């Protein structure tokens, strides 16, 4: 709190926007006490504890489409997605594959475990590399820092061709990986899902079962309902290889998924949020769709 008060006094911000997590608390509360307008953004389908608690101090609340926060009807709520980094854009598949050096004629499965990596997904990859390669599926696995060494391995394919697999602890080429992939296998964090939508990449999501408030399950259910891909529980990894093969070789289904993802990516979240924050900082009255819900009148 002392640091936050000092920061507010030095920087003198026109507005504050918080994206969740306990580190928001001090700055949001200090800003409120200094009469600085506060906005909060929740990317997950289940609002986290920080957003639920701090929302009482906010003048704006950005929530995913269709998500509500009980008891906060008086807030000026704007439904929008999570902004992604500007370098994460969909590239032509041939260009993305050329950058990575993968075989353009073979299928490519990209496996992501989120920012920390996912041990169960890494183990699944290790156990299934040879079988996937036999079917002609290349695998690119981002293991997470400290959870694997970078390297390339080669396996024989069914027709005698060489099928390569790649493993690296970290990647700063997520947009390129997703653009090159036929299918992504991933956890269901809000950031990853936003990147999948941005790159129009179909995915099979394996929610982390111990995420706070089980929010990854809710994220994955919505992604599947919107037609961006499939959801498989972590306790069903035994059937995952067949699910991957059935999906990655189904051209009609992948095309359908991509079309649904293109529909989901229609809004520029950054422009929406920045424009609204500028109005908030300037004290401009909100647009009609942002005005507070009027209190019910007694009969």
Image (spheres, helix red, strand yellow):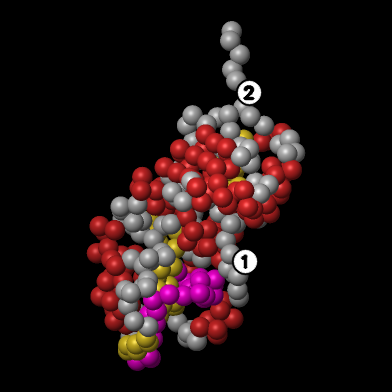
- Percent coordinates x, y for residue 283 in the rendering: 73, 39
Q: Which mark is residue 201?
A: none
The residue nearer to you, when weighing 168 against 52, is 52
Identify the magenta region.
160-183
Q: Residue at x 41, y 68 (%)?
A: 112
- Marks 2 and 1 sit apart, C-alpha to C-alpha, by 38 Å
- Residue 53 is a magenta residue: no
Which residue is label 2 attached to?
A: 294
The residue nearer to you, when weighing 285 against 240, is 285
Q: Is residue 64 left or right of residue 86?
A: left
Q: Residue at x 28, y 66 (%)?
A: 120
Q: Is residue 287 above or below residue 256?
A: above
Q: Is residue 146 left or right of residue 203?
A: left
Residue 115 visible to the viewer = yes
Which residue is label 1 attached to?
A: 86
Q: Residue at x 27, y 71 (%)?
A: 123
Residue 258 visible to the viewer = no
The kind of secondary structure element at disc 2 is: loop
The residue nearer to you, when weighing 218 against 241, is 218
- Residue 170 is a magenta residue: yes
Q: Is residue 45 above or below residue 244?
A: above
The quadrant of the picture occupied by the C terminus is top right
The kind of secondary structure element at disc 1 is: loop
């Amino acid at each position: 709190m002392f640091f936050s008060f000092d920061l507010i006094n030095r920087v003198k911000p026109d507005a504050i926007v918080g994206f969740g997590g306990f580190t928001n608390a001090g700055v949001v509360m200090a800003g409120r006490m200094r009469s600085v307008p506060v906005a909060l953004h929740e990317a997950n389908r289940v609002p986290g504890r920080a957003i639920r608690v701090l929302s009482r101090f906010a003048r704006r609340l950005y929530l995913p489409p269709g998500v509500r926060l009980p008891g906060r009807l008086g807030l000026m709520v704007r439904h929008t997605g999570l902004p992604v980094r500007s370098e994460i854009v969909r590239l032509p598949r041939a260009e993305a594959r050329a950058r990575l050096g993968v075989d353009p004629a073979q299928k490519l499965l990209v496996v992501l475990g989120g920012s920390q990596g996912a041990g169960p997904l890494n183990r699944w990859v290790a156990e299934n590399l040879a079988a996937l390669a036999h079917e002609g599926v290349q695998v690119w696995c981002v293991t997470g820092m400290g959870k694997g060494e970078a390297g390339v391995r080669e396996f024989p394919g069914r027709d005698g061709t060489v099928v390569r697999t790649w493993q690296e602890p970290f990647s700063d080429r997520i947009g390129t990986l997703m653009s090159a992939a036929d299918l992504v296998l991933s956890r269901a964090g809000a950031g990853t899902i936003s990147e999948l939508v941005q790159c129009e990449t179909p995915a099979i999501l394996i929610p982390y079962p111990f995420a706070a408030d089980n929010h990854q399950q809710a994220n994955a259910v919505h992604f599947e309902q919107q037609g961006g891909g499939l959801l498989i529980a972590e306790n069903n990894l035994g059937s995952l290889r067949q699910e991957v093969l059935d999906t990655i070789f189904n051209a009609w289904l992948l095309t359908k998924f991509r079309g649904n993802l293109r529909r989901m990516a229609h809004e520029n979240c950054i422009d929406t949020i920045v424009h609204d924050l500028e109005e908030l900082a300037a004290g401009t009255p909100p647009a009609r769709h942002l005005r507070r819900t009027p209190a019910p009148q007694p009969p």
